[in-house]
């Protein structure tokens, strides 16, 4: 699960905890105990503020992360969120697929960089090397 998008990893952890009969809070805590990613500090801060009864501070988050935190807040408040988590998981998976497709679309252009930097100059040396040696021999005579 290390390679999953961090919000998707959090969502899957909470959903599986709910399916195992545990609370939403237990799922969030399990996510926080797992190996950290870039979303873990955000969730830890958000959970701390929730448990202390503080108003959630404004954080620069993507729309998907904000929606996930809102759903988790509803789950911590005692609302049933399993169906929303399943729907949200489908949306996250679709967004991940779109991101992978866009990365794959740019891959051919990125692969041209080594070609232009390393292989093309070597090809030019092979092409013009004999011509240059013949030209230098003709200048010597």
Image: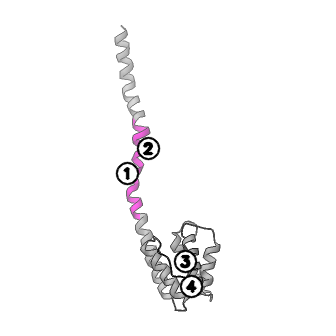
Q: Where is residue 85 in the image (x, y as percent from the top left)?
A: 49, 83
Few, some or many residues within 10 Å of mark 2 (<14, 14–19, 20+)? few
In three-dimensional space, the C-alpha distance between marks 2 and 1, rounded to whole angstroms, equals 10 Å
Residue 109 numbered tag? 1
Few, some or many residues within 10 Å of mark 4 (<14, 14–19, 20+)? few
Question: Mark 3 near mark 2, Cβ–Cβ under 8 Å?
Answer: no
Mark 2, residue position: 114
Few, some or many residues within 10 Å of mark 3 (<14, 14–19, 20+)? some
Mark 3, residue position: 46
Q: Quadrant of the C terminus?
A: top left
Q: Quadrant of the N terminus?
A: bottom right
Q: Which residue lies furthest to the right in this view?
A: 33
Q: What stretch is highlighted in magenta?
A: 101-120
Mark 4, residue position: 53
Name the colouring of the figure.
one colour
Mark 4 vs 2, N-terminal side: 4
Query: Judging from the image, what secondary structure is the residue with disc 1 in?
Result: helix
Q: Where is residue 39 in the image (x, y as percent from the top left)?
A: 54, 70
The residue mark sitting in front, 3 or 2, is 3
In three-dimensional space, the C-alpha distance between marks 3 and 2, rounded to whole angstroms, equals 44 Å
The residue mark sitting in front, 3 or 1, is 3
Relative to residue 98, is residue 55 depicted above or below? below
Query: Judging from the image, what secondary structure is the residue with disc 2 in?
Result: helix
Check residue 127 for magenta coloring: no
Q: In this view, does 34 lie to the left or right of 66?
A: right
In three-dimensional space, the C-alpha distance between marks 4 and 3, rounded to whole angstroms, equals 11 Å
The residue mark sitting in front, 4 or 1, is 4
Relative to residue 141, is residue 95 depicted above or below? below
């Amino acid at each position: 699960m290390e390679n999953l998008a961090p919000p998707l990893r959090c969502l899957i952890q909470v959903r599986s905890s709910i399916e195992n009969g545990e609370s939403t809070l237990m799922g969030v805590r399990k996510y926080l105990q797992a190996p950290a990613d870039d979303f873990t500090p955000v969730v830890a801060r958000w959970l701390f503020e929730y448990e202390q009864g503080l108003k959630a501070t404004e954080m620069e988050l993507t729309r998907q992360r904000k929606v996930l935190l809102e759903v988790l807040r509803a789950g911590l408040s005692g609302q049933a969120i399993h169906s929303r988590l399943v729907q949200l998981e489908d949306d996250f998976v679709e967004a991940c697929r779109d991101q992978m497709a866009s990365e794959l679309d740019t891959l051919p252009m990125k692969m041209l960089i080594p070609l232009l930097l390393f292989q093309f100059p070597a090809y030019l040396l092979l092409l013009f090397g004999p011509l240059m040696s013949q030209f230098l021999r003709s200048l010597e005579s």
